[in-house]
Amino acid sequence: MKPIPLLSLNLSENALAYRVIYQIRCPACKGEGVVGHPIWNEFWETDPRPQFEDDYQARARELGYASLEDMPQEEITCNECEGLGYVRREVPLAVALKELGLL
């Protein structure tokens, strides 16, 4: 998917420069807006398929929680895109035109 360009005008070192702001799907969360909590990532890496509820509870205690219910939410808002699912980037107009095959 090609970036969506939005034309912007910025002052750069006392000279007027054309720049393009574009949106891309967030590489960190792949557009979902959320990522796995690091504690839960560790939980699943260690024992991806506990067989019994007691196994889950024991694993939570190993991670320093009194019970599974005391653990944080499994997914958290993505820091990269702040939950939007996309990030904005800014490049010089010439770079954007080249990427779009217009230069």
Image (tube, helix red, strand yellow):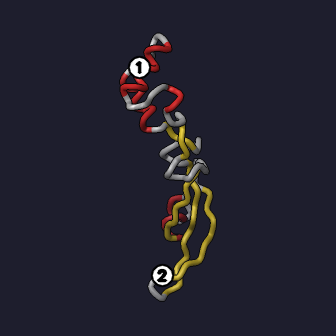
Q: Picture coordinates of residue 88 (x, y %)?
A: 55, 59
Q: Residue at x 45, y 32 (%)?
A: 40
In this view, the residue in front, 60 or 89, is 60
Earlier in the chain: of badge 2 and badge 1, it is: 2
Circle nearer the viewer, 2 or 1: 1
Q: Residue at x 58, y 56 (%)?
A: 23
From mark 2 to mark 1, how far is it between C-alphas? 57 Å
Residue identifier under label 1: 58
In this view, the residue in front, 8 or 2, is 8
Q: Residue at x 56, y 53 (%)?
A: 82
Q: Picture coordinates of residue 58 (x, y %)?
A: 41, 19
Q: In this rendering, does residue 71 appear at all?
A: yes
Q: Secondary structure at mark 1?
A: helix
Q: Picture coordinates of residue 19 (x, y %)?
A: 54, 72
Q: Say if 26 sits above or below 10 in the image.
A: above
Q: Residue at x 49, y 26 (%)?
A: 68
Residue identifier under label 2: 12
Q: In this rendering, does residue 30 appear at all?
A: no
In this view, the residue in front, 56 or 33, is 56
Q: Say if 12 sits above or below 88 in the image.
A: below
- Point out the residue furthest to the front here: 66
Q: Picture coordinates of residue 50 (x, y %)?
A: 44, 15
In this view, the residue in front, 24 or 101, is 24
Question: Label 2 amino acid?
Answer: Ser
Question: Label 1 amino acid?
Answer: Ala
**Is 2 on the left or on the right of 66, as rendered?**
right
- Point out the residue furthest to the bottom here: 14
